[in-house]
């Protein structure tokens, strides 16, 4: 294909042929909902040392209307933020024709800044998990559900109740309502002789905007959730772990301090986003446990 100048912000018809790698890109974006160039590179072009070839394929997929893109908020003094990509109509139609399950969102290009940044943080967390487990000798990921995934018969539910991870629990004495709606759910499973062993994790991406009392209420909700054994709808899990990735080490320490003596805090592990990478998420003691001590996730 000869090099063609393509404007950044205005689509232009250009002939090009879809490759298997392009299909891999579309599948990845469909799975994650929003991905930035460097994230797609790590997923689909792991052997490339630069983003050049990734950016080139994304450029053509955008102009051919397979992908849409949106510019995240640019923090003053920190340079330009990478463009985020989402599955556009042609990409949705193509994957549907191929028999893929496609999540269709009509206004992916109109999301608010805070929602987009939160979604990209969840994508980064999930990406680090997937990369960490690619060649793991003992553990693999059996399932990952994101907050945007809907129930199979979502049309029979209303509003937030349409989503797979949304659940309401009520305190047996006060009758107060608590919402359990994690950003993600992850099931890890053993390999080989450990194949029958599974662990359930709920993922909370905290950007430091919620009050500590709100987080405390979430943990109360998770405690009631466990008492009612709601997690059984995802498998026979006696208990689970709540993973909170927050904005800084100071914030992580404050969250743990706020949860002292709170029933349900024994399920909670907290870390800061600056400590989470594919090589640390399971292999280094980056998580604060209920005793405010650093621990390994798979200990």
Image: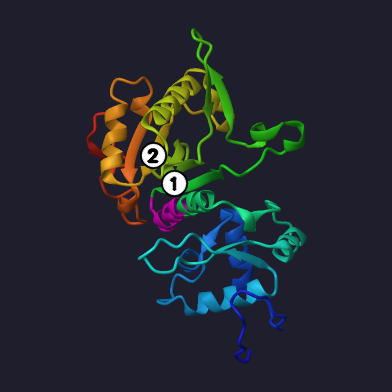
Residue closest to the eye, 130 or 217: 217
Q: Is residue 263 placed above or below 121 in the rendered structure?
A: above
Q: How is the image coloured?
A: rainbow
Disc 1 residue crowd, few under 14, some 14–19, many 20+, Cα 10 Å? few
Residue in view at x 28 percent, y 24 percent: 260
Give the secondary structure at mark 2: strand
For mark 2, what is the residue? 244
Residue in view at x 64 percent, y 34 percent: 160
What whole-number distance in Å separates the C-alpha atoms at marks 1 and 2? Answer: 30 Å
- Which percent across, then down, holds residue 159? 68, 34
Residue closest to the eye, 107 or 166: 107
Give the secondary structure at mark 1: helix
- Which percent across, then down, holds residue 121? 45, 52
Looking at the rendered image, the quarter that the C terminus falls into is top left
Q: Is residue 57 placed above or below 86 in the rendered structure?
A: below
- Which percent across, then down, holds residue 180? 52, 29
Residue in view at x 63 percent, y 77 percent: 60
Residue in view at x 36 percent, y 43 percent: 246
Residue 266: quadrant of the picture: top left
Residue 64: quadrant of the picture: bottom right
Q: List the single residue furthest toward the top.
A: 173
Q: Is residue 32 placed above or below 232 in the rendered structure?
A: below
Q: Select label 1 or label 2 by which is in front.
A: 2
Disc 2 residue crowd, few under 14, some 14–19, many 20+, Cα 10 Å? many
Magenta residues span 124-137
């Amino acid at each position: 294909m000869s090099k063609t100048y393509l404007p950044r912000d205005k689509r232009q018809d250009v002939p090009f042929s879809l490759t298997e790698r392009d299909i891999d890109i579309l599948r990845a974006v469909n799975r994650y909902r929003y991905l930035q160039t460097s994230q797609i590179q790590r997923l689909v072009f792991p052997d490339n040392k630069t983003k050049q070839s990734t950016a080139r394929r994304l450029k053509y997929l955008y102009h051919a209307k397979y992908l849409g893109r949106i510019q995240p908020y640019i923090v003053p003094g920190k340079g330009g933020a990478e463009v985020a990509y989402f599955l556009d109509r042609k990409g949705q139609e193509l994957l549907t024709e191929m028999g893929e399950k496609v999540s269709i969102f009509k206004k992916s290009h109109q999301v608010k800044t805070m929602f987009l940044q939160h979604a990209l943080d969840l994508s980064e967390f999930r990406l680090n998990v997937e990369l960490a487990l690619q060649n793991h000798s003992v553990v693999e990921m059996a399932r990952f559900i994101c907050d945007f995934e809907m129930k199979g018969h979502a049309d029979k539910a209303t509003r937030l109740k349409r989503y797979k991870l949304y659940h309401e629990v009520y305190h047996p004495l006060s009758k107060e309502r608590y919402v359990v709606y994690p950003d993600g759910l992850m099931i890890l499973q053993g390999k080989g002789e450990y194949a029958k062993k599974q662990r359930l994790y709920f993922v909370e991406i905290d950007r430091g905007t919620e009050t500590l009392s709100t987080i405390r209420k979430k943990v109360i909700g998770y405690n009631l959730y466990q008492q009612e054994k709601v997690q059984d709808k995802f498998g026979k899990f006696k208990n689970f772990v709540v993973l909170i990735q927050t904005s800084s080490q100071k914030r992580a320490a404050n969250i743990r301090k706020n949860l002292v003596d709170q029933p349900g805090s024994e399920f909670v592990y907290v870390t800061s986003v600056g400590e989470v990478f594919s090589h640390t998420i399971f292999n280094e003691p980056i998580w604060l446990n209920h005793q405010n001590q650093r621990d390994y996730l798979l200990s």
